[in-house]
Amino acid sequence: MVIVSLKDTDKIVPQMDGVKGVYKQTPLSKENGAPNFCFRVFTIEPGGHTPLHKHPFEHMNYVIQGQGLMVSDTQETLVNKGDFAYVEPNEMHQFKNPSQEQDFVFICAVPIEFE
């Protein structure tokens, strides 16, 4: 069994074009011995966003703080603390924080080989 506190996890700025005000923490991954899945925690600061992008694996997300927009190539959907969201493989998506005051924080689970 492995127990990791988020506060003890490094904060890394993702190296992707179009990232603004985002950092990632990876509390559970292959480094902890996980064979199949990885938990990442993204914090998007007020006014920040990830790029609009797609990739060949799914995301399973859970909002743990604030609210944000999940953007596809056809719509924007507001998500709130306590919401779950699924992004299909190869689906265009982006995460935005429309707030001017509070961080938007969510857990993102992905297959380990894509971390």
Image (spheres, grey):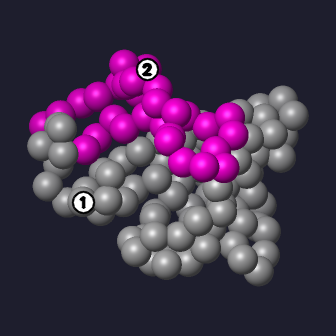
Q: Residue furthest front?
A: 17
Q: Residue at x 46, y 64 (%)?
A: 59
Amino acid, disc 2: Lys
Judge whether 104 appears above or below 95 on screen: above
Q: Callout 1 environment at 10 Å: few (<14), some (14 to 19), or many (20+)?
A: few
Circle nearer the N terminus (2, 1)? 2
Does residue 50 show up?
A: no
Residue 2 rendering spot, x and y as whole percentages: 18, 34
First to last magenta residue range: 1-29
Judge whether 59 appears above or below 74 on screen: above
Q: Residue at x 45, y 77 (%)?
A: 89
27 or 95: which is nearer to us? Answer: 95
Residue 109 rendering spot, x and y as whole percentages: 39, 56
Amino acid, disc 1: Glu
In the shown orientation, is residue 90 left or right of residue 103? left
Residue 56 rendering spot, x and y as whole percentages: 40, 74
Q: Residue at x 52, y 33 (%)?
A: 13
* Helix, strand or loop under label 2: helix
Judge whether 33 appears above or below 103 on screen: below
Marking on residue 113: 1
In the shown orientation, is residue 76 left or right of residue 44? right
Count of number-bearing discs? 2
In the shown orientation, is residue 44 left or right of residue 32? right
Q: Is 108 contained in the magenta span? A: no
Q: Callout 2 environment at 10 Å: few (<14), some (14 to 19), or many (20+)?
A: few
11 or 39: which is nearer to us? Answer: 11
In the shown orientation, is residue 76 left or right of residue 2? right
Residue 16 rendering spot, x and y as whole percentages: 54, 48
Q: Which residue is mark 2?
A: 7
* Helix, strand or loop under label 1: helix
